[in-house]
Image: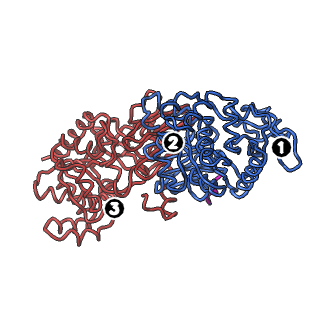
Chain colours: A blue, B red
Amino acid sequence: MRYGVILAGGGGTRLWPASRRARPKPLLPLGVGGRSLLAATVARAARLGGVVIVTAADQAEVVRAEVGDAAEILVEPVGRNTAAAVGLAAVHLAARDPDAVLCVLPADHHVAREDELVAALSRALDIAHAETKIVSVGIVPTRPETGFGYLELGAARGDGVRAVRRFIEKPDAARAADMVASGEYLWNAGIFVAPAARFLGDIRRHMPEHGRVLDAIGAGADAAALYPSLPSTSIDYGVLERTTDLLCVSGEFGWNDVGAWSALAEIVQPEDGGGVRVGGPLVAVGAKNTIAVSDPGTLVAVIGIDDVVVVQSGDAVLVVPRARAQEVREAVAAIERAGLGRYL
Amino acid sequence: MRYGVILAGGGGTRLWPASRRARPKPLLPLGVGGRSLLAATVARAARLGGVVIVTAADQAEVVRAEVGDAAEILVEPVGRNTAAAVGLAAVHLAARDPDAVLCVLPADHHVAREDELVAALSRALDIAHAETKIVSVGIVPTRPETGFGYLELGAARGDGVRAVRRFIEKPDAARAADMVASGEYLWNAGIFVAPAARFLGDIRRHMPEHGRVLDAIGAGADAAALYPSLPSTSIDYGVLERTTDLLCVSGEFGWNDVGAWSALAEIVQPEDGGGVRVGGPLVAVGAKNTIAVSDPGTLVAVIGIDDVVVVQSGDAVLVVPRARAQEVREAVAAIERAGLGRYL
């Protein structure tokens, strides 16, 4: 059977103050129709088959409150990066269903064209199942983004499926421009598909420490005791980059990783006045291209500044120019240094 | 006996969203030591003698909650501008104390050097009492402000007291610069002193309609029935400008009318980082000269914008450049037009 495996771990500070330690980014209402990104991802995964969410213990409660009975939740005692999380889902599902095929999905991405993505995921699941392969689902790049990793494409098979030659770390601007212009690279969105047994085989081969711990947990050992000892390694680094027969399918999907507040201008329809808003009303006077986010019922008024991001969430307010939205991380660091960590 | 008569009527929108219909500007915690401007004014008035607050019915409850037993509160059925308010206090106090001398004080000004102002008010009260005169207390101007009215000085008496030759409406920038350079003009701060009987005599002479209504109220007529019929006229226009023997004393007093959010930079000590804040903490990263106002406990973070005003109050957030803080009124009008008057 097919399973959507949603990775809902990790923190992320670039969407502070809406995202907090107690309300991570997947819980933000930035999905299509005002759903949380997580709820949108669960709905997407449900179109593939069963839905499993892997999350760390400290976020399990808010995740459960958000999705209710719509997903099975696997709780990691502590977060140990994506290799462990995928491995935990694989060992859990393989025990239940030896033919389980997994589609791994990040919980915090926005997808405007769900049907296209679900069709591509479905195709990837078919190929992975039929050929016992790992199939990455890459995003056709629309700009020379330096904030993402890329997949370098290899041989074409004639059916639209390509080999993946190698993984490229975040490039500089010149390299990114060359790569995007060549048409031979995809954004690595962290979406990939394989039979559970194939994932586990590759983990055992390339990451023997992970393999031993996961097999012990599969045999009934106490995860709480074993799991924390696992190295924090990504599935990309630990498995995918070492897999010689990696395939990929691709599309654009209106995909957006919502990596900073400035991304809202790409995923939210503008108001009449030209700004975009999520939450309460926006009044902009002599202010173009505002991005406003607030609690429902909280009004944001901007006068006489163009291209500004204003985010109010609970007991914090952020103001930053759109072009500097990446620097929210620096503000978060400054808040921590100022002894104001309770706001994070 | 001497009385401080505090005029706490009127709305004012330039300090939105902290000032609202239900929480007018005098209630904002912008006085020295974090007190409300009203509480600071009551403390100032109490150093002169009895304290009377004149306020309109729709604000009486919040005013009473703010000052408790520290002042007697006279409630106008409806606000009818300052001539009616001063007249109401005068008729009320004259009935109790024929020798009452009144010092009229706006409720919403910030004064850094209370002792200096109280000394000047006390001197004005002495002169007004001894000579049965109206004595204005003017502010020595520190900049060519175009937002204030001015008093043109007349003959000097040798004791520092000057005659007032006439009132000047808000001047243009060139005229304001000339006036300030000449040293012969004061800002009209709406502070003035006279015996209650003198105020009433002048009101009867110059404003016979007010005189009749106030005398009827003094004789026990129903204020709720008569008061609303009064024209809305300022005491400046109705009485002071027509008074031929008006005197004045002057000083600087660290006086500030807090006419817009930008004024906070003049009355609040800056943080280490260079910004000023009232309420919750401020974290500024690559942002100079921030003015931040928030509910206590609410953090304001500003990244990469200089000279910005950020105000969070309850269910509204305002962002405006310091140089455009006067335009808050336009935002308030836009909010009203947008059907969002519940935020005002």
Amino acid type of the residue tagged 3 in the rendering? Thr
Tell me where residue B117 sits by quadrant: top left
Q: Nearer the viewer, mark 3 or mark 2?
A: 2
Residue A222 lies in the magenta-colored region:
no
Residue B50 falls left or right of residue A200: left
Residue A162 tag number: 1
Residues at badges 1 and 2 in contact (C-beta under 8 Å)?
no
Q: Which residues are magenta?
A: A267-271
Secondary structure at numbered mark 3:
loop
Task: Tell me if residue A205 comes above or below residue A91 in the rendering.
Answer: above
Label 2: how many Cα within 10 Å (few below 14, some 14–19, many 20+): many
* Viewer-side residue, A287 vs B176: A287
CA gap between label 1 and label 2 equals 34 Å
Of callouts 1 and 2, the N-terminal one: 2
- Residue at x 46% of width, y 54% of height: A298
Q: Residue furthest front?
A: A219
Name the residue carrying label 3: B233
* Viewer-side residue, A37 vs A105: A105
Residue A79 lies, in percent from the top left, at 54, 35
Residue B104 lies, in percent from the top left, at 25, 49
Secondary structure at numbered mark 1:
strand
Amino acid type of the residue tagged 1 in the rendering? Arg
Residue A284 visible in the displayed image: no
- Chain of the residue on which disc 3 is drawn: B
Name the residue carrying label 2: A75
Residue A153 lies, in percent from the top left, at 82, 39
CA gap between label 1 and label 3 equals 82 Å
CA gap between label 3 and label 2 equals 71 Å
